[in-house]
Amino acid sequence: MSKAYITSYEEFEAYLGKKIGTSEFTIITQDQINLFADATHDHQWIHVDEERAKKESPFGTTIAHGYLTVSLLAYHWNTLVEVSNVKLQVNYGIDKLKFGQAVRVNDEVRVHVFLETLVNLRGIAKAYLKVKMEIKNQKKPAFEAFITFLYHFE
């Protein structure tokens, strides 16, 4: 995997309509799931009760919170792209988020990112990205969405 290095609006623009990249696979662990449950106060048994999930869950094991998988976008994005020469980066929004399939504990996930649009707002780059989180050896993605970042270049 080669990392993209972007230092200006013009360099960002070169990716318009193209795939920026695909991240490496990372494993979703039970420790991550438990920590996310603690941070969000969402301790639903399907996420944190391993014994009950083995017996009662249709997945046969615990699953990651949907928003845990979404929150990993920042990590995966930063492994794909290094945007420098910026005063500030802002997460501006998520559109059309659709969960396709549950991510089971110990599944491996990665993201595919495409630059759909890029708008220059008086020196601020508004990047609209299509993202898809793939689950290794599964046909359906964990989710698909469009995310928007704002970059205030120097």
Image (tube, grey):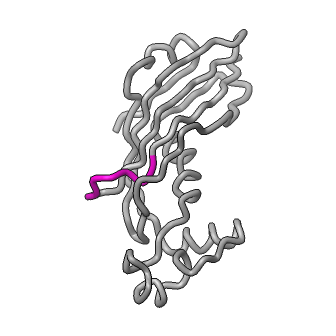
Instruction: Locate residue 122, reporting x and y percent.
Output: 72, 9
Q: Position of residue 76 (x, y in %)?
A: 49, 45
Task: Pick whichever, 51 or 85, lies toward us.
Answer: 51
Q: Residue at x 55, y 64 (%)?
A: 65
**Magenta region includes residue 54:** no
Magenta region: which residues?
Answer: 137-143
Dividing the picture into quadrants, the one containing residue 123 is: top right
- In this orientation, which residue lies closer to the viewer: 56 or 62? 56
Residue 37 figure quarter: bottom right
Is the residue 28 above or below the residue 25 in the image?
below
Disc tally is: 0
Q: x, y percentage for residue 7?
A: 57, 19
* Magenta stretch holds residue 138: yes
Residue drawn at (37%, 28%), measured in percent from left and top? 19
- Front one among 11 and 131: 131
User: What residue appears at the point 68 percent right and 72 percent down from the top-left corner?
Assistant: 38
Image height check: is 107 above or below 122?
below
Q: Height in image: 88 above or below 137?
A: above
- Could you tell me which quadrant the C terminus lies in? top right
Give the quarter of the image for residue 152: top right
| Spot occupied by residue 12 in the image (x, y as percentages of width and height) | 51, 18
Helix, strand or loop for the magenta stretch, by majority:
loop
5 vs 101, left or right, is right
Residue 96 in the figure: left or right of residue 122: left
Q: Nearer the viewer, residue 63 or 71?
A: 63
Quarter the N terminus occupies: top left
